[in-house]
Image: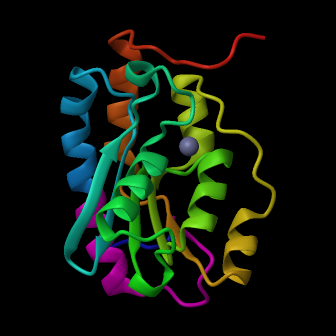
Amino acid sequence: MNTNNIITNVDKIDAEKLKHASEIIAKLQNELPEYIDHGHGPFLAAIYQGDKLIAKCANSVVMDNCSNHHAEINTIRAAQSELKTYDLAPKNLDLYITAEPCMMCIGAIMWSGIKNVYYGVPSKKVEKITGFDEGFKPNWLEEFKKRGIKVYGNIETELGEDVLKQYVKSKHVVYKPSR
Ligand SMILES: [Zn+2]
């Protein structure tokens, strides 16, 4: 696969891991429209241990009336509940997300003990397509690297961008606090 556009904080890209991540993220993007049809926001996340799916959740901010129910946070909570631990670090888990995590989710990922993060559409693109506010995230890739969390981004972005464009076109809610 073409790795030219990949955003990462690892020194050397692991092509095999990236190929595996592309397959999982493409699958999530293909599943996402059905979640949207059922009232979820346009973001889906999954946590795997190797090939084993531990948890998968979509954004549920609107349906739950809760501003922190992002896909990543819902998925981390489900994985910790499933594995009965607040510290996922010893489990060596991979988090796959259809889009780059926002400033809130970056914190949630850091505290969860997740070791590897793979995401699809970068925040700048998400903001441009949808109008969602992804927050400010100074040097998060470097900060994650210091903490031993590997990140790969910009995976299968075209698929992801299409889902987001469709979300906006169908006039679904682009929620944010009023100012
Ligand atoms: Zn978030």
The residue nearer to you, when weighing 95 against 169, is 95
Give the quadrant of the N terminus: bottom left
Q: Within the magenta stretch, is there residue 161?
A: no
Say which residue appears at 22% left-offset and 67% top-offset. 53
Give the quadrant of the C terminus: top right
Say which residue appears at 26% left-offset and 38% top-offset. 32
Q: Can residue 6 be seen in this view?
A: no
- The quarter of the picture where residue 147 lies is bottom right
Q: Within the magenta stretch, is there residue 10?
A: yes
Q: Can residue 52 be seen in this view?
A: yes
Q: Residue furthest front?
A: 84
What percent of the width, then of the height, locates residue 98?
39, 49
Which range of residues does the magenta coloring cover? 5-25
The residue nearer to you, when weighing 62 against 36, is 62
The residue nearer to you, when weighing 143 against 113, is 113
What percent of the width, then of the height, locates residue 75?
38, 53
Where's ligand 1: which quadrant?
A: top right
